[in-house]
Amino acid sequence: MKKMALIATKGTLDMAYPPFILGSTAAALGYDVHIFFTFYGLTLLRKDLSDVKISPLANPAMPMPVPMPVFVQMLPGMEAMATMMMKDKMKKKGVASLAELRALCQEADVKFTACQMTVDLFEFEKSDFIDGIEYGGAASFLEFAGDADICLFI
């Protein structure tokens, strides 16, 4: 069986989709998949995903309906507006929500590991996270990743 190891390090809306899309797709293709969530990627394992946002600031590839100077992107409320616009566009195009993709991964037996060091660093409680995840360090993840056919850092 082929193996895919993913490291999820970011918790913004645009960076939250790749590990779940790649993980669920690989699992559907018969891969054994393991995602290690560390630093800001750890927020993707929290029960509530409603606070996952996207920022137009320092994200020049983000398509905007009209060109916006950088100083406008810094204004209060722009992150909320960009997040709302992106979520609305995804819904209109039939893109699954983060919660749906995450659940699909779990149903497909994608293994989720929360970085214990990051949990401790940010003083999270295990009750903050969804059920069905494991806690471990880099060494436990590397046991799997060392034999993986595909290893990606996101």
Image: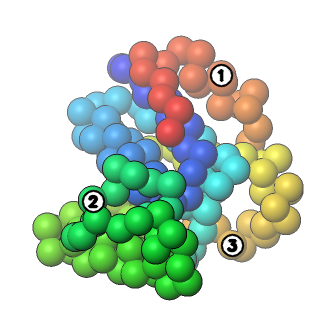
Query: For residue 137, what is the image quadrant?
Result: top right
Residue 99 lies, in percent from the top left, at: 40, 68
Disc nearest the viewer among 2 and 3: 2
Query: For residue 48, what is the image quadrant?
Result: bottom right
Q: Residue furthest left?
A: 93
Residue 51 got which mark? none
Residue 143 got which mark? 1
User: Quick one: SS at disc 2?
Assistant: loop
User: Quick one: SS at disc 1?
Assistant: helix
**Amino acid at dot 1:** Glu
Residue 146 lies, in percent from the top left, at: 59, 16
Q: Is residue 83 above or below residue 153?
A: below
Q: Residue at x 27, y 41 (%)?
A: 25
Marked residue nearer the N-terminal end (1 or 2): 2
Q: Residues within 10 Å of mark 1 (few under 14, many from 20)?
A: few
Q: Residue at x 69, y 72 (%)?
A: 128
Q: Alpha-carbon distance for marks 2 and 3?
A: 33 Å
Query: Looking at the image, do the residues carrying marks 1 and 2 touch, with CB atoms under 8 Å apart?
Result: no
Q: Is residue 114 above or below residue 91?
A: above
Q: Residue at x 57, y 23 (%)?
A: 145
Q: Nearer the viewer, residue 21 or 66?
A: 66
**Amino acid at dot 3:** Asp
Q: Which residue is the site of mark 3?
A: 128
Marked residue nearer the N-terminal end (1 or 3): 3
Query: Looking at the image, do the residues carrying marks 1 and 3 touch, with CB atoms under 8 Å apart?
Result: no
Residue 108 lies, in percent from the top left, at: 35, 48
Residue 63 got which mark? 2
Query: For residue 26, what is the image quadrant?
Result: top left
Marked residue nearer the N-terminal end (2 or 3): 2
Q: Nearer the viewer, residue 55 or 30?
A: 55
